[in-house]
Image (cartoon, rainbow, N blue to C red):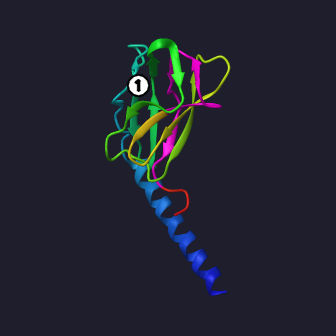
Amino acid sequence: MPDTIDTLGRRLAKLERRVTTLERARRAPYPEWRDLPLTGDTTIADEEQPPQFRANLWDTTEFCGRIGLTGDRATDEQLVALLPEGYWPEAPRTVDVASDAARRGLQLDVDPKGLVRLRVQGGGSVRASWISLDSASFRNDRDDT
């Protein structure tokens, strides 16, 4: 029985922290978008939609824009960006992204050091000239705490 009470107490404390965060976020202005530092064989695919990110007050990092892939190839484990310190997730995150790849889906892996790597479903590489970050986001905090 004490284990159950301890477990419930931890869950209640976590819920109270989340409610406090949400109440604070509702009152604060939304943060500005920042340019995403690209690395490797990547470019800005569309000047009208540069790759950008922001961390909102709900412990979530949001992305928008398009990343161009030089050579028209998406390669598994390709490093595409590096998030600045302070935007790193506490646990590894995987985010689905849209692209012009015809056969296989693409994802971004974001590790706790801020490295953003492209993942190709099934590994290897696939023909793709861009990936869209629009509507992609990940939680910064851990799921299990």
Residue 55: say if magenta. Answer: no
User: Closest to the observer: 75 or 58?
Assistant: 75
Instruction: Name the residue at 63% across, 31% down.
Output: 121
In the image, is residue 58 above or below residue 119? below
First to last magenta residue range: 118-141
Instruction: Name the residue at 40% across, 14% down.
Output: 48
Residue 3, percent from left and from top: 62, 82
Residue 92, percent from left and from top: 50, 48
Residue 35, percent from left and from top: 33, 28
In the image, is residue 145 above or below residue 69? below
Residue 122: say if magenta. Answer: yes
Q: Which residue type does callout 1 highlight? A: Pro
Q: Which residue is mark 1?
A: 51
User: Closest to the observer: 73 or 24?
Assistant: 73
Instruction: Name the residue at 33% across, 30% down.
Output: 37
Q: For mark 1, does the 10 Å Cα neighbourhood hold few (<14), some (14 to 19), or many (20 or more) residues?
A: many
Where is residue 38, by image quadrant? top left
Where is residue 123, by image quadrant? top right
In the image, is residue 39 above or below residue 87? above
Element type where label 1 sits in the image = loop
Residue 66, percent from left and from top: 46, 21
The reply, left or right, for residue 39 in relation to residue 144 is: left
The reply, left or right, for residue 8 in relation to residue 90 is: right
